[in-house]
Image (cartoon, grey):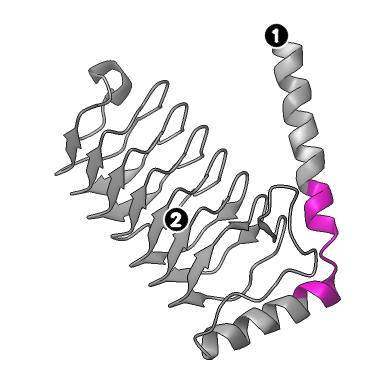
Amino acid sequence: MKKIIENSKSANMRDAIRKQLRWDEKLSQSTNQEIALAVKRHSALPSSPFDRTEDGFADFRGFPLKVQLSRMAISDVDFSHSICLLAGALNNCSVMRSRFSGAKFDGRFVGVLFEDCDFERVSLKNAALGSASFLNCNFSGANMIDVMARGAFFAKCSFDRANMKKAVLLACTFNECTFDGTEFHNGSLVGCKFIGNRPSDDQLGNTMI
């Protein structure tokens, strides 16, 4: 079983690298410029040069996002394995039915609504979620070490097997979320409200609550 898991992780890593390498410097720069222009004009996200995935999502897998997305309505986009290290990466956007599996976001989400989005194995380490809302989103296996949020709202979200050590989540609401195998330690959940499900005392350990 251990070998199967290791092989699966290796395959995922190889796939992520392939998706990232297809965005050479010229293509990455031109696509970021197109997105920046769309943001300035308050228009929709431009089409991907790789068209759509087999599942019908706009194919931005592995894309190195270097533009702050502001006041955009984004739907049915696959950002799996993408990298965005900009502060203020998402600002007052609505994001629906989109994928961020294995992506890396180390920035700030301001006034963002995520609905029916997949964040499986995403890295949100050190990210600031602000008062974002997440409805029916999957954070299974996510790296949420040192993540910060104040007043964020989570409804019907899965945090199963997520690493939330040293996370500082203040006055957040968790409505009917699941926490099977979630890790907490040295963090804070002060003022948080749990409706329906709650992490066990053993899981929380020395987390302030």
Compared across the picture, whether 61 is left or right of 113 comes to: right
- How many numbered discs? 2
Quadrant placement of the N terminus: top right
The image shows residue 17 at horizontal and vertical percentages of: 80, 48
Compared across the picture, whether 154 is left or right of 84 comes to: left
SS category of the residue bearing label 1: loop
Q: Is residue 20 magenta?
A: yes
Q: Residue beneath label 2, please?
A: 127
| Kind of residue sitting beneath label 1 | Met
SS category of the residue bearing label 2: loop
Residue drawn 54% across the image and 69% down it: 86
> Which quadrant holds residue 122?
top right
> How far apart are labels 1 and 2 at the CA level?
33 Å
> Which quadrant holds residue 5?
top right
Q: On screen, 28 above or below 126?
A: below
The image shows residue 135 at horizontal and vertical percentages of: 35, 48
The answer to whether the residues at label 1 and label 2 have Cβ atoms under 8 Å apart is no
Residue drawn 64% across the image and 58% down it: 83
Q: Along the line of sight, which residue is nearer the eye, 35 or 25?
A: 35
Residue drawn 74% across the image and 21% down it: 6
Point out the stretch of residues depicted in magenta.
Answer: 17-28
The image shows residue 46 at horizontal and vertical percentages of: 65, 76
Q: Is residue 41 magenta?
A: no
Q: Any mark on residue 1, and which?
A: 1
Q: Nearer the viewer, mark 1 or mark 2?
A: 1
Q: On screen, 134 above or below 197?
A: below
| Kind of residue sitting beneath label 2 | Ala
Residue 84 can be seen, yes or no? yes
Q: On screen, 46 above or below 167?
A: below
- Main SS type for the magenta part? helix
Q: Along the line of sight, which residue is nearer the eye, 94 or 102?
A: 94
The image shows residue 208 at horizontal and vertical percentages of: 20, 35
